[in-house]
Image: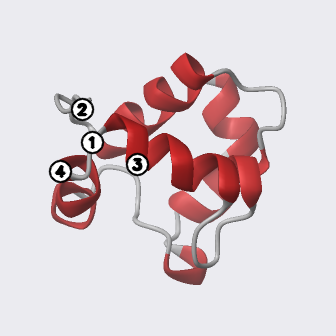
Amino acid sequence: MTLYNRSCISCHASGSAGAPRTGDATAWAARIDQGREMLLKRTKSGWIGMPPMGMCTDCTDEQFIDLIEYMAQSKITKP
């Protein structure tokens, strides 16, 4: 996934700065439970060690959701 490799891999592959690791269902579960709107809000504004827009300044909301679901290996079911 090109966007993941460009914008997310540097922190989410290693867990750098407290980022939940890609594929770690346990680390992602509580985040996924917060729902789509909260995840988008935190992704766009930045959260803890993650910069605003998660280093993808040209991503759309749908691309962010796709990236989150890819990293979490889970679908976001709550709005």
Residue type (three-letter) at the residue carrying disc 4: Asp
**In front: label 3 or label 2:** 3
Residue drawn at the location 52% of the way across and 69% of the way down: 14
Residue type (three-letter) at the residue carrying disc 2: Ile
Label 1 with label 2: CB-CB less than 8 Å: yes
- Residue 4: horizontal and vertical position, in percent? 61, 36
Residue drawn at the location 17% of the way across and 28% of the way down: 77
Which residue was labeled with disc 4?
33
- Residue 40: horizontal and vertical position, in percent? 51, 41
In the image, residue 13 sits, relative to residue 49, either above or below, namely above
Disc 2 secondary structure class: loop
Mark 2 → mark 4, Cα distance in angstroms: 8 Å
Residue type (three-letter) at the residue carrying disc 1: Gly
Front-most of 1 and 40?
40
Which residue was labeled with disc 1?
35
Mark 4 → mark 1, Cα distance in angstroms: 5 Å
Q: How many marks?
A: 4
Label 4 with label 1: CB-CB less than 8 Å: yes
Front-most of 56 and 36?
36
N-terminal label among 1 and 2: 1
Mark 3 → mark 2, Cα distance in angstroms: 11 Å
